Image (cartoon, rainbow, N blue to C red):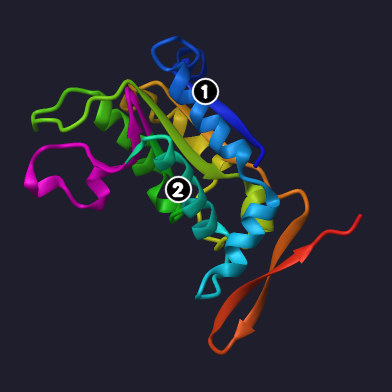
Amino acid sequence: MNFRCLSHRNGETIANDSEFSNEWTEIKEVLTGITDEDLITEFESRTRVEKSISLTINKLIKERLVAKSWAEESPIFQSKEHTSGKWRLDFAKGKISVEVAFNHGEATAWNLLKPSLASEYNYIDKAIQTKLGIVIFATQKMKKAGGFDNAVGTLEKAETYLKPMYSLLPCPMIIIGLEEPESFVIEHKKDGNRKVGHVVKNYF
């Protein structure tokens, strides 16, 4: 997959420092290593036909990061009261945390805050201490081509949060926007009361 980056508090510069560069390289390798054919094969092999390729992308990212020894669903805090999904990082390794943010646009602020929760000291004992956050969104073009729900947040929306929330986001971050597939789109068809996605290849 192709992607573009926004750098918050010099996140991209920091990612190329020796303390972070190996993990940052792994993230880039995982994303660029997911081909259109990988997306199509995984999407069409799912037992339940989905509306979009969001779960497909999630699954492929998860499999490939875990294969590189990234921890999944890492709790931010030690407290048993704060171990549910909203208090967990999607992935973590070394000093980097990763969030894959294909959820409702209203969760955009929370998705951006989680790396700072993981990096800053807190009154509640921490289970992990990171220094750099990576948050992955779909771009507006990916949202459309990939069949995503209209309510899903995007890179473009996340960008509008960075300045007004600057003081609340002390953790350096790289905000990644996944670009649309080059060779296909997802088109919706009705299946009873629900919309399902179908791969339509581009022939040009």
Instruction: Assess disc 2: are there few (<14), some (14-19) or many (≥20) residues with their C-alpha within 10 Å of its C-alpha.
Output: few
Q: Which quadrant holds residue 42?
A: bottom right
How many neighbours does mark 1 have within 10 angstroms: few (below 14), some (14-19), or many (20 or more)? some
Residue 101, x across and y down, in percent? 45, 47
Compared to residue 171, the image places residue 61 above or below, namely below
Percent of width and height locating residue 8: 47, 22
Residue extending farthest to the bottom is 192
Q: Residue 151, how many percent across, how many down?
A: 51, 59
For label 1, the SS is: strand
Q: Nearer the viewer, residue 119 or 167?
A: 119
Q: Where does the magenta region start and end?
A: 72-97
- What residue appears at the point 51 percent right and 36 percent down from the top-left corner? 160
Seen from the viewer's position, the closer of residues 116 and 49 is 49
Q: Looking at the rendering, in which quadrant would you find the C terminus?
A: bottom right
Is residue 90 covered in magenta?
yes
What's the residue at 38%, 49% (across, down)? 107
Residue found 9% across the figure and 30% down from its top: 125
What label does residue 7 carry, if any?
1
Q: Nearer the viewer, residue 123 or 198?
A: 198
Q: Residue at x 32, y 20 (%)?
A: 131
| Residue annotated with mark 2 | 63
Q: CA distance from mark 1 to mark 2?
A: 26 Å
Query: Does residue 108 appear left or right of residue 31 in this picture?
Result: left
Which amino acid, mark 2? Answer: Glu
